[in-house]
Amino acid sequence: MSDETLSNLLREERRFPPPPDLAEQANATAAAYDEAAADSEAFWAAQAARLDWAEPWTQVLDWSRAPFARWFTGGRLNVTENCLDRHVRAGRGDRVAFHWEGEPGDTRTLTYADLKDEVSRAANALLSLGVQAGDRVAIYMPMIPETVVAMLACARIGAPHTVVFGGFSAEALRGRILDCDARVVITADGGYRKGAASALKPAVDEALEQCPDVRSVLVVRRTGQDVGWTQGRDVWWHDLVAAQPAEHTPEAFDSEHPLYIMYTSGTTARPKGILHTTGGYLTQVAWSHWAVFDVKPESDVYWTAADIGWVTGHSYIVYGPLANGVTSVLYEGTPDTPHQGRWWEIVQKYKVTILYCAPTAIRTFMKWGDAIPGGYDLTSLRLLGSVGEPINPEAWMWYRRAIGGDRTPVVDTWWQTETGAHMISPLPGASTCKPGSALRPLPGISADVVDDAGHPVPNGSGGYLVLTEPWPAMLRTIWGDEQRYLDTYWSRFPGRYFAGDGAKKDEDGDIWLLGRVDDVMNVSGHRISTTEVESALVSHPLVAEAAVVGATDATTGQGIVAFVILRGDAAAKGADEDPAQELRAHVAREIGPIARPRQILVVAELPKTRSGKIMRRLLRDIAENRELGDVTTLTDSSVMDAIRERLPEGS
Ligand code: 6R9
């Protein structure tokens, strides 16, 4: 990426130091950076000591077969013993683990003691189905407490789970089941989404037509809708699990025992099964959850408003919060069911103190307008987090102001399925935040931005984000494909992990994420990041959200095509004026004439994955007038038809 275009971008000068009271009582202080810099293995060993180990480790890191890491070798522990039993033993069994809120408004409260009993029953149920340590179990569920129970039951008996988004197709489910050779599937009749019961079991039945080795399907009754039934294979959760004893003694597993496989959708290629293991993963998710969210288990009510089928749900709905003994909210549905204030109603009801969500949600709320959150009491909130995409500075500012009452720090956390846990993020009690920047690597983490030749770029320049030292929660491999692990992550810059993201270091050396390098556009030889043009568009008062792609252009190589969603009030006011000219001029002013979009299309929605990432690949297909590529990981495929209808004649 050339420096010239990047250095004139993102001139963001607003600064937000930590609130003094938060800083005073912060879990993690600036001292953590020094400690970790002095001896990172000693730092991680100290964090691992937060967990209960049945047997201590003999070596913190074994990197002798790099890049295949082993952390806390020789150590043995049980993940659910750490997430459940030890809290109950210490007299915290009555603490609420989850306030669950179903989309139709039904609720359930599970204490740590309840959860331990449920997980023990489910573990016994899996054992009765013949599941053994090491066997893979696929989970295809809505956002209900049984999903957490199912994951933990697997972890308790050492059976790696693979959770597949409830919104994925039968085909996607089948591919994942076959790739990891799962023999048991846990599912539900359906779940509630957008005010209606949405079926899941039919997709399982369809997928299993071509998965002959799956011998059992455990089915939770959630919606009560009719389900097809295969005798001898299908069994109701409420029949099997409820009949089990609530006692189960957890076995300690090796620190490197597989905990789960999470598939990431490659854009074109076969999905990659990212393998996470036990000791290092739990150490880093527990530490980062404690440090980055500054959680106080006695008083906080924590809410990751994301799907459990995304890595964010694994690390920061399930494993991190439970390892720390925190009270969480778990919400089944969509943010606008039955009304657009649903999230804020939940914050008010449970007095949520820490909220973690994706920029896509924040920009949607921006589009709906300030009045909606303004109608609720959000004063319980003391910290906000963002994850999943670069957060545009204006969206960051809106989040802090309209949701955080101009008081709360906003932590922008950069990480990936592959990293398992937060990697680059502010520490809310120690860092001065900059809207749109994830700032710097967390203590114990080493990252850099390098040029094409792999040399670190100077401050003020852009390039490729790499991780330069192994970290405890790192993926161990791609399931069943060591070569692909090496090729994908470790061959572009030998000895360093290539994240696939572009980034820039500012004058202070702080890091700004610029999106996937595959999305970088090349306009007349200038490399321009989609993130920067999108952020310029979102900084205009008319725009709530923008997606930018490079489309083949006969004269410039690529031309910038922008798809924009207008803010609610703007869309109403200027219904018949086309804002394209104004927005093109605005981008030219903010960034430079080279970044002026060739074309701007106003749309109502953008194509997104279930974790809220904009699928620019599909927009590129539209901009270049091609057949759409693979849409199996899209949340709602009708969005693409709606966008096509907006295209001007002949394009
Ligand atoms: C946790 C998660 C990983 C990709 C990652 C990057 C993007 C995530 C981000 C961010 C900028 C952030 N990403 N967090 N970009 N700022 N705070 O999202 O995992 O679904 O595997 O996606 O998401 O592009 O490489 P995953």
Image: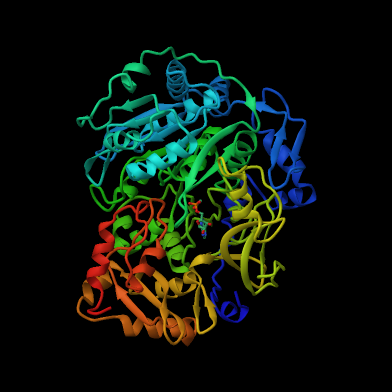
Residue name at image x 41 percent, y 34 percent: 139
Towards the viewer: 289 or 256 = 256
Residue found at x 49% / y 30%: 136
454 lies above or below 648: above
**Which corner quadrant of the image does residue 18 belong to?**
bottom right
Question: Which of 479 and 224 lies nearest the eye of the viewer?
Answer: 479
The answer to which image quadrant residue 245 occupies is top left
Q: Residue 571, how many percent across, how many down?
A: 25, 71
- Residue 545 shows in this picture: no
Left or right: 496 as drawn, with respect to 606: right
Up/down of 129 relative to 1, above or below = above
Q: Position of residue 513 (x, y in %)?
A: 55, 64
**Residue 391 sits above or below residue 387 on the image:** below
Residue in the picture at 49% in, 42% down: 262
Which residue is at the far right? 38
Query: x, y percentage for residue 344?
Result: 34, 49
Query: Measured from the top left, where is residue 633 in percent x and y?
Result: 37, 52
